[in-house]
Structures are given as structure tokens and as C-alpha cells.
Image (tube, grey):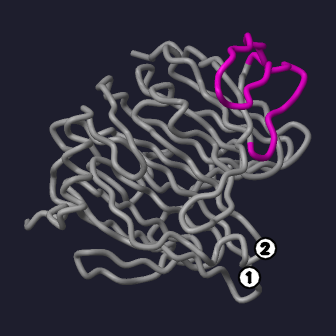
Amino acid sequence: MNTVQVPRKIKKVWKSVPTIEGAGVHLRRAFGFHEVPLLDPFLLLDDFRSENPVDYLAGFPWHPHRGIETITYVLDGDVEHGDSMGNRGKIKAGDVQWMTAGSGIIHTEMPKGNRIGQMFGFQLWANLPAQSKMIAPRYRGIESKTIPVVKTPEGATVHVICGEINGTQGPVKEIVIEPEYFDIELPIGTTFTHQVNPEHTVFAYVIEGEAYFDQARQPFSHETTGMNYFDFNPECACHDGSLVLYEKGGNQITIAADKKATRFLLVSGKPLNEPIAWYGPIVMNTQAELRTAFQEYKDGTFVKEQ
């Protein structure tokens, strides 16, 4: 029995905005605290790209995380990392680090760039459900050579980090929010069509170029929020730095690169529909849990023995 294909419509489009994080890292934030729970189960997406080492070398010195997963995807340059469990290493161009903070980890991330000073990558935060907030921390270091690259019949090139494209699965599996995470390149005149779970949150972030992300090219109404949202003109494609959030309900998305080649991230996941208490690098379900986490960090009992 064939499933009826119901195209998803765009709910909102907005531009990433400049911000400074860590010890002085200049980056662009696609979404964060002010969008909760709009992108549930996802919490934050940062785009860090620069050709000037001054923008990023200060990095992210030692800091705690609890209750979330941080997913770092590097396209160019290196990021050195270390943590309270004794792990040390580098996230290199094309690599992904999927870190489950769980009950608590203290770590450092220091962008180093490439030989000519370029740095380019993304960090995505995904929430953990209440029952998994205090699980043991763990790392999944995924080297670029283990990330399959799929050529679709339509002409797309897809780097499959998590999820499945045309029978090819990404190396990241058994994640509680059932995510998909693709890095997709579309030449001019090509399209990409993908089936999604109608109940899952789905968004795209444009890395370069431009494309149409709504098959019917339908406009949507402006909603006033804290971010730089704008009305979607059906005659205008979404371009570099645009975050495209889809409405729920449909099971198919189609992206078309009519005028320019494009590259974008496509991410989806199962909403948790749970309360969020969030301050800085820690995300819990209640303010009491949040206070406990910071008190334990102050007392030196934050990292649990596993």
C-alpha cells in the first residue's frame, strides 16, 4: 500500500544573527533560547565561520553541560577538545562529535582553524528527555571517512550523518530523539525530495547559495518574535544564513535549486513536549533541578562517578 504524499509547508523563515559566545568567539546564531519550544527537541544552532583567527581563537574554555547533547560538525579547520573524563582530541574537517552530556561533564572546545586561518562549522544542541537527563556522559567521535555520501537520482549529494537516504544509514544511531542530520548539496537545476515523520520537527539551514524550500512556494504570515523573522515571498528563494522551519503534519519536503547551487543542513527529530529550565550550558526540566546542577558545580560534585 502506497502512502499518500503530503507536502510540508514552511512555517517560518528567519536569518541567523551575530552573537559572541565562550571567551569571545564571534559566530551567527540560527536559533536559541528565545525559540524554545518552537524547535523542540532542538535547543540551539550556532554557525561559526571565519577567515580571521581573532574571531575564534579565544574559544570555549572549561565549562559544564548537563541534560543535553551537543553535536559539533566541522567543515574546515580543527577544534581541539578535552573533558573531565580524560578525553582529548581534535575534531577535523568533515568530522562530527556527538556528545551526550547526560548527568554532567566539564569540557573545553578550542577552534584552531586550518593552515590559512579559516574556521567553519556548526554546533547543534539537542535536548534529552527527563528520564535520560542523568544518564552517563559519552562521546561519539565520527570521522569524515565513516560518513557516507549518497548521490540521489535527482542530482543531490547527501552527507548522511544520522538517518537514512535511499537505504544508506548514517553512522550515528540509537539516539532517543530519533534524529536525522544531513548535509546536502544541490547543483543548479536539481531538486531534493525526502520523506519525513509527520510528527517530527523539521528544519533546514542554508550554508551557501539559495533554494526554494516549499514545493508549492506558498507564502506564510509574519509572526512577531525576538528573532529577525520576515515574510516569505514565494518569488524569493531562501539564501545563505536562512533558517527554514516547517509546519508539522506533512510527510514530504522538496527543495529546489532553480537559480543557484546551494548547500544546506536538513535536521529532524521527535519532540519531547516536556518543560524546559535552561540557563547557560545546562538544560533541565525544573528550576529546582537547575539550581541543584549549579550548586553541585560550585561544590565540585557536578561530575558523577559512573
Q: Is residue 217 magenta?
A: yes
- Name the image quarter holding the N terminus: top left
Q: Identify the residue shown where x is 61% and y is 17%.
A: 7
| Image quadrant where residue 228 sits | top right
The C terminus lies in quadrant? bottom left
Q: Is residue 19 magenta?
A: no
The circle on residue 279 is: none
Q: Which residue is mark 2?
A: 51
* Residue at 55 percent of width and 47 percent of height: 45
The residues bearing labels 2 and 1 have C-alpha atoms spaced at a distance of 6 Å
Identified by mark 2, the residue type is Glu
Q: Secondary structure at mark 1?
A: loop
Left or right, 240 with reference to 147? right
The range drawn in magenta is 216-241
Q: Is residue 135 above or below residue 210?
A: below
Mark 2 residue element: loop
- Mark 2 or 1 closer to N-term? 2
Give the amino acid at mark 1.
Gly
Look at mark 1 in the image and give the residue it sits on. Answer: 117
Q: Give whichever of 268, 279 is nearer the camera.
A: 279
- Give left or right: position of 189 versus 193: right
Q: Position of residue 209 (x, y in %)?
A: 83, 48
Front one among 76 and 303 = 303
